[in-house]
Amino acid sequence: MPQRGVSPSERLQVVNGAIHLQGDVVTLANGLTITSSNDPITIGASNSLSLAGEIKTNRGVITIDNGNNAATAITLTHLVALNSTNEGPYGVNPLLQGADISIKATIGGGISNNLWIQAGNSGDVSLSGTTASIASLFIAGNDINLASVDGIGGLFVQALDAASPSTDSGSLTLTGNTYRITGHGSIELDSGSITNPITLAGPNSAATLFQTTGCFTLTCTDPPTDPPTITPKGLVELSGQLNLNGRSLVIDTTNNGASPQGGLHIRLNNSIDGPVSLSLNGGTKGFVGLNDIGGITGSQSAPLTDITLVNAKEAVLVRDLWAGSLHLLKATYDSTGHLE
């Protein structure tokens, strides 16, 4: 099958009818905007897809794969926005409805290129291949399934509750084992409500790793919102009911000791369910907090196997904690009782 390409600065618009692009190698050049009404946009690239620009529908499904419901390889050549809410491309409006966005592909393309995915409160998002070596990944949708992220500049995920035409609570399922950030960026995951689940579902019940490279060699600033860019905080923050689902969790903001000061903070804001092990390393300057907003860690009937605090400048365990053992590996304190 021949290559398929669309030239820069073109606009492809279909008011009524689906858009299908298919070939061995598919190229969508920078400056391109593809829009459809409420009909689907399907891209099938059996070998590879070079992607740039914006793909937008008005509640029409967006599907990217190899043309046969299996994985392809995507290379981002510029900022890319996939949007099924007919708005944006940036920002999150929790009232907007959208449609499903499915990507079966590995994703790469260099640390200057961002990927923004917006499916609204009624569209589910699924990324089934590893995302690596891009500037940042932003996802908003109802039920979100995300495979491994290994070596990108920042990860921001926001699940949304749908209220109309029927109630559908948001959720986030992590189907990979590695979520590793480079370049002092952050991991910020929000399931949309304190009772909405964040579920670890990596293969073979292996441990899940969240890792950043810290931020104290830079000025730690609040994240920009439009467009998405790298956030120099090095933090990890999860908001939602965290279900470890039989998989141990390791959170490390020191890049395995290479950035010993760590990131701004590690916060697991709501309930944490086991029973497995949890290891937290906030570095020599980072803050670690559990259950800041609500919930408890473990339970009397199902405690975590063990919790290990490797290091932190300050650690706050706000509510009840149930675990077989609690290890504080940094055992010296300053005059205020904080970990030194």
Image (cartoon, rainbow, N blue to C red):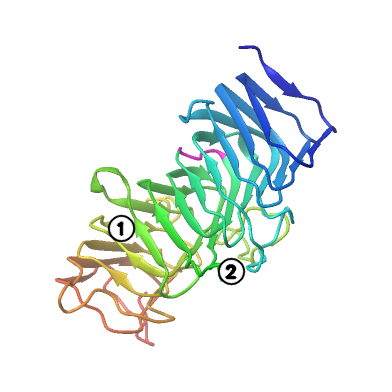
Q: Is residue 269 above or below residue 98?
A: below
On screen, residue 288 versus residue 123, left or right, reads left
Whether residue 131 appears in magenta in the rendering, the answer is yes
Label 2 environment density (alpha carbons within 10 Å; few <14, some 14–19, many ≥20) = few
Label annotation for residue 304? none
The image quadrant where one finds the N terminus is top right
For the record, the magenta segment spans 129-133
Frontmost residue, 56 versus 16: 16
- Tell me if residue 29 can be seen: yes
On screen, residue 324 versus residue 238, left or right, reads left
Residue 100 position within the rendered picture, expressed as x and y whole percent measured from the top left:
56, 49
At mark 2, the secondary structure is: loop
Label 1 environment density (alpha carbons within 10 Å; few <14, some 14–19, many ≥20) = many
Residue 219 position within the rendered picture, expressed as x and y whole percent measured from the top left:
63, 63
The outermost residue toward the bottom is 336
At mark 1, the secondary structure is: strand
Q: Is residue 330 above or below residue 232?
A: below
Residue type at numbered disc 1: Leu
Q: Earlier in the sequence, mark 1 or mark 2?
A: 2
Whether residue 275 appears in magenta in the rendering, the answer is no
Frontmost residue, 150 versus 53: 53
Residue 252: image quadrant is bottom left
Residue identifier under label 1 = 249
Residue identifier under label 2 = 164
Q: Are marks 1 and 2 in contact (CB under 8 Å)?
A: no
Q: Is residue 106 above or below residue 88?
A: above
- Tell me if residue 261 can be seen: no
Residue placed at 37% from the left, 50% from the top? 256
The image quadrant where one finds the C terminus is bottom left
Residue 315 position within the rendered picture, expressed as x and y whole percent measured from the top left:
37, 76
